[in-house]
Structures are given as structure tokens and as C-alpha cells.
Image (cartoon, rainbow, N blue to C red):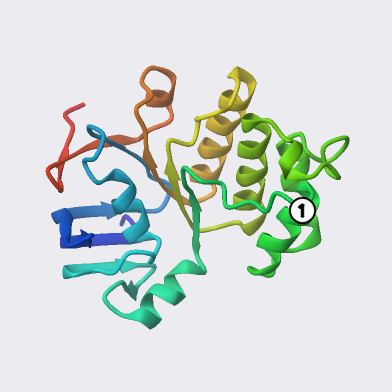
Amino acid sequence: MSEGPVVELEGAVALVGGFPALAGADLRLRPSEVVGVRGPNGAGKSTLLRLCAGLVPLSRGTGHVMGHDLASRDGRRLARRSIGLLGHATALYDDLTVRENIEFWSGANRSLHADIRGAMDHMGLADRLANVPVSGLSAGQRRRTAIAILLARRPRVWLLDEPHAGLDTAGRDLLDQLISDAAAAGASILVATHDRGRIDDVLTRTVHLEGGMLSAVPT
């Protein structure tokens, strides 16, 4: 018997500036799934991820992440403990070094030192870049630092918004492998992306978001 959904939305409505960025979305995400979300700019892809991350209130409908109710402030707070969100903005502190940023953001989740070191090793940040202030990094190095924070936290649910942005070919290949490995270990992954081709090999299925509504994409 398959496991129940980790993320479950039914008729979910989320408002941004009073406008329904999501207008009755239905979604179920199960363990080990890698679901791609595609749609035009402004369709609500980022809002969908932020709703699942507990950062945007649920206005109508129902929504649960790891069994926590997204309509409740406490439920959203508890859900965030199991979530890793990689958004457009990296949320890094420019005046802190790469290591200090990863330790700071991972410390909030009580990550183990070994997990932090392992994440830095994975993303090629453990040596010469570890003590470089983030203000001195390239866009790709910033992205690698943000991904290392996500890895160190070991989230059950990955929410990735255009995750390949700013990465070179090697970085994109590495991220695809990390996504595959995380899914194999039981993580549930939602990826908002315009990328086609290689990323399709990582996805288990794809949904389309337009007009605030989600629909399945035929395989």
C-alpha cells in the first residue's frame, strides 16, 4: 500500500495583495515524488510553494503539510520544521562568510555539525570558499551556499523555485543528482521550473498552473 500524501491541498485559495494567486488548487505530493510545476510567469508558482512552506496564509479550502493544518498559525509553524524552501532570493547575510551563513541558518534547525560539513563538501564550499564573505561570491556560488543550507537541514519536503538559476552546468548536474538522491531516501520534492529536457528525467510527474488552478500534464 502506498504512503499517504505529505502535502495535500484541496480547493486551496491564497491571496496576494487581495488577488487570488491560487484560486482553488488541488495537489497531493507523496514520499519520494518529484513533481514539477510549470506555467506562465505570474501563474502563482511561487505562491504555491510559499503556501506549502507555511509562509502564505490559506484563505479558503484545506491544506496540510506533514499532517499540519496550513489554515492554523501553529500548524504553519510546525510544518516549517520539515520544509526546505529554495526561493528566488537566497536570504543570505552578505557580511557573514559562507560557513557562518550555513551554520546560522542550519543552527535554527539544530542540524548536526557533520551534516553541515557534509553539505559544504557536497556543494564544493568546504575549502577556499568557506571563509569568504557572501558579498564576494558570484551568483552561482551564492546559489550553492543556499543549496548547502537546505541539505544541512535534511528536510522531509523540498520546495524549489527555479532551483537551477545561476548555476553552471556542473552545478545543475549536481543539483539534479541531489534531488534524485533525496527522493530515493523518501523526501517529497516540488519543483517550480521553466527548464525542459534534462530536468524532465528527474521528475516523476508534472502539473500545470494557470489562472490559479492546477491540472495534470499528460505523460
For the N terminus, the quadrant is bottom left
Q: Position of residue 192 (x, y in %)?
A: 36, 39
Q: Which residue is mark 1?
A: 96
Closer to us: 2 or 150: 150
- Image check: 95 left or right of 180? right
Point 78% across, 40% down: residue: 121
Point 72% across, 38% down: residue: 122
Identify whether 206 is placed above or below 93: above
Identify whether 9 is placed above or below 37: below
Q: Position of residue 93 (x, y in %)?
A: 68, 53
For the C terminus, the quadrant is top left
Identify whether 107 is placed above or below 25: below
SS label for mark 1: loop
Q: Position of residue 184 (x, y in %)?
A: 51, 43
Q: Position of residue 119 (x, y in %)?
A: 72, 46
Q: Label 1: how many residues lie within 10 Å, few (<14), some (14-19) or many (20+)?
A: some
Point 61% across, 29% down: residue: 174
Closer to us: 41 or 36: 41
Quadrant in which residue 53 is drawn = bottom left
Point 26% across, 75% down: residue: 71
- Image check: 211 left or right of 82? left
Amino acid type, residue under disc 1 in the picture: Leu
